[in-house]
Amino acid sequence: MKAEDVRNAYAMPLTNPAYPPGPYRFIDREYVIISYRTDPEALRAVVPEPLEIVDPIVKYEFIKMPDSTGFGDYTESGQVIPVRFEGEEGVYVHAMYLDDDAPIAGGREIWGFPKKLAFPKLVHEGEVIVGTLHYGSVLCASASMGYKHRSVDAGEIAHSLAKPNFLVKIIPHVDASPRICELVRYHLEDITVKGAWTGPADLQLFRHVIADVARLPVLEIVSAVHFVADLTLGLGEVVHDYMGEPE
């Protein structure tokens, strides 16, 4: 293999990459998002500067992705936090747990998504939607929501999805010292919301040493939304380099 062939590589392993190059299009992506009020001190301990916390609110997400280009069929669960960056409102992706190797590798390597392998599920059981997150055999999150109680304006959901998302991308050097530590911004693109609903919901989080979703405790359920959408996961841009800061 020639050196120029190596330079043209886009992902590991070199001769059999874990995922194909994008763009990454998602069809019939099904969301259940439960927004809850949490402990402001706990929130401040996990949101990095220069992001600013808007309110002590966390959005706990279950996302079922049956048709995603290059990544296949998988389910994801995790927490995003409403934030502000240089006057622009968006969300900070704090934790993500999913059951498919390709989007774990691609998400971490390209954008810096905080993805870990776990076992989330989103299923319809009679008149409710149930979301669970297991890490191994341990239940870490359990959510339930009434099925399609009231319609929600699809335009409002699309507007919310179009807001910027922020991540901290961390890549170590070969000696385990920090090599890349950046604040990344990305957007969801070409969004079509096919239906959106709200209803009563509940969420329980349980302590776990690795899947530590309970670090941001549920104090009060604020709202819940269930929707289905097609969208494209846009590529990112670096908006802050932590390695460039003075020590």
Image (tube, helix red, strand yellow):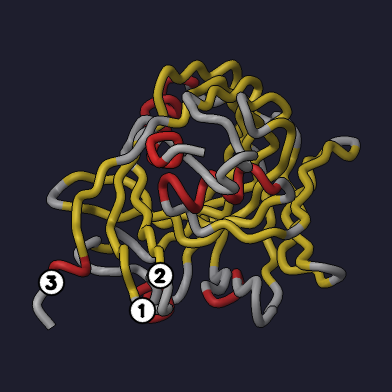
**Helix, strand, or loop for circle 2?**
strand
Q: Is residue 52 above or below residue 33?
A: below
In the image, 149 versus 159, the foreground residue is 159
Residue that mark 2 sits on: 172
Say which residue appears at 26% left-offset and 42% top-offset.
237
Counting residues from the N terminus, which is met first, the one under dot 1 or under dot 2?
Answer: 2
Q: Is residue 240 left or right of residue 193?
A: left
Crowding around mark 1 (Cα neighbors within 10 Å: few <14, some 14 to 19, many 20+) is few
Mark 3 touching mark 2, by CB under 8 A?
no
Residue 131 image position (x, y, % from top left) = 75, 50
Q: In this view, does 41 lie to the left or right of 99?
A: left
Residue 78 image position (x, y, % from top left) = 58, 56
Residue that mark 3 sits on: 245
Q: In which quarter of the image is residue 226?
A: top right
Mark 1 touching mark 3, by CB under 8 A?
no
Crowding around mark 2 (Cα neighbors within 10 Å: few <14, some 14 to 19, many 20+) is few
Counting residues from the N terminus, which is met first, the one under dot 1 or under dot 3?
Answer: 1
Counting residues from the N terminus, which is met first, the one under dot 3 or under dot 2?
Answer: 2
In the image, 202 versus 10, the foreground residue is 10
Amino acid at the residue labelled 2? Pro
Q: Is residue 45 left or right of residue 64?
A: left
Residue that mark 1 sits on: 177
Say which residue appears at 65% left-offset and 34% top-offset.
71
Q: How far apart are marks 1 and 3 (CA)?
A: 16 Å
Between tags 3 and 2, which lies in front?
2
**Helix, strand, or loop for circle 3?**
loop
Mark 1 touching mark 2, by CB under 8 A?
yes
Say which residue appears at 56% left-offset and 74% top-offset.
217
